[in-house]
Amino acid sequence: MTRNFSDITPYVKKMAAIANANNKITSEMYAEHKVYRGLRDEYGNGVVTGLTEISDVVSKKKQPDGTSVPCEGILCYRGVNIKELVAGFLKDKRFGFEETAYLLLFSKLPDREELEQFTKELGEYRSLPTSFVRDMILKAPGKDMMNILSRTVLGLYAYDDNPDDISVENVLRQCLHLIALFPMLAVYGYQSFNHYHCGNSLFIHLPDKNLSTAENLLRLLREDGKYSPLEAKILDLALVLHMEHGGGNNSTFTTHVVSSSGTDTYSAIAAALGSLKGPRHGGANIKVVRMFEDMKKSIDTENEKEIEDYLNRLLDKKAFDNAGLIYGMGHAIYSISDPRADILMNCAKDLAKEKGFEKDYALYEKVAKLAPDIIASRRKMYKGVSANVDFYSGLVYQMLELPCELFTPIFAIARIVGWSAHRIEEIQNAGKIIRPAYDCVKAPEKYIPLSDRA
């Protein structure tokens, strides 16, 4: 009988136990060997491994005496403060995705003519090869949208007449195509899942070249293709806020590492997608939404004392997933505030009024106020804790009636721009392959002939 390759056989169980028993590395050994696990020191400071002009994340300000103190979080895209950038396109009642993508890719804000030309070019790139949706998506429907996205990105390699050329011109061409296609690949992957695995009707809409990225995403996803101006505006804003976040985040660092090997664009972006799929990186907003769903089932959310008790039980590993975490609170860099969360919080309030989610929004506000003090009173802290962008993005996506299966792919639809900018920057400054060192802590052993082994 043919073995089911998904089964964990008794042999595998036995050998996994041996592998676990033979692993002698402990967390204390990292401090002993002065190794910064995760390229971050004990205070959360990142080990500098490269240079970039693409974005900057600031959480501390230097004082005259040389010390650093926490400050309100600052995020800059090519030197432009994200709050000023967002305020600019919101004031003009424009969509910001295309303008921000231009800024990140070309290191300058576009004038009106440049923005119109760039937007038109993206529209022209919103076209998949003949039969691609049928052969690559509908014939092999999957249950995980990020895996479908990775598979389709790798599949595009076979349709590219010049896939391995890593000149800036060719990589830019590939990146523009991927930026334009990601909403289609993500939504079509979801539609195949929703039809073949959930039993719902299948519909595939074609994109409209004259619509923005956010408008196209909503149009492709909804059966009637309709959306409100506020819905499109807030989705566009969420995409801008998730587009880039410094070279040190896991998926962007992955892009640099893989690109430094000289590989093709499709392989590099697929690697970044694999990183983003991880729940410690791209899946946090889903955890936030599910945590709040559990909270609403478990307690009276109008009672502040019960909310406090629930948050304490989360930290005690006695509520929700028993992981000991309040999801959406805290960030590897920010301490006092996450500027992306500040912006999204205000817009989420407007959407909550339109969608009838005022009670949910009020609950999020209460948790955002209570959680930092509760965490600080319970945990050893090297920096402050505040709500991060994932705290509010999940609520926003819920109000936009986006399926939770698409939460992380939407992150990817935004972050593909940042990955593209970093891939081009890595190619422009190509030198040595990125190859960090590891200390081997295994003592030397003599080879024992097979006949002498017990």
Image: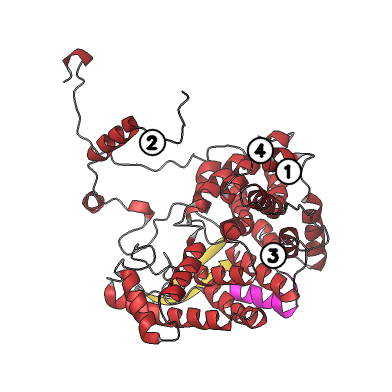
Q: Is residue 141 left or right of residue 61?
A: right
Residue 8: numbered disc: 2
Give the CA distance from mark 2 to mark 3: 45 Å
Q: Amino acid at mark 3?
A: Phe
Q: Nearer the viewer, mark 2 or mark 4?
A: 2
Q: Amino acid at mark 2?
A: Ile
Q: Is residue 87 magenta?
A: yes
Q: Earlier in the sequence, mark 2 or mark 4?
A: 2
- Residue that label 4 marks: 155
Q: Amino acid at mark 4?
A: Gly
Report crowding for label 1: few under 14, some 14 to 19, many 20 or more residues within 10 A (C-alpha): some
The stretch in magenta equals 78-95
Q: Is residue 283 placed above or below 71 in the rendered structure?
A: above
Give the CA distance from mark 2 to mark 1: 33 Å
Q: Nearer the viewer, mark 2 or mark 1?
A: 2
Q: Secondary structure at mark 4?
A: helix
Question: Do labels 1 and 4 touch, CB within 8 Å?
Answer: no
Give the CA distance from mark 1 to mark 3: 25 Å
- Residue that label 3 marks: 97
Q: Secondary structure at mark 1?
A: helix
Question: Do labels 1 and 3 touch, CB within 8 Å?
Answer: no
Residue 350: numbered disc: none
Position of residue 413 measured from the top left corner of the image (x, y, whole percent)? 64, 56
At 60% from the left edge and 81% from the top edge, which residue is drawn? 349
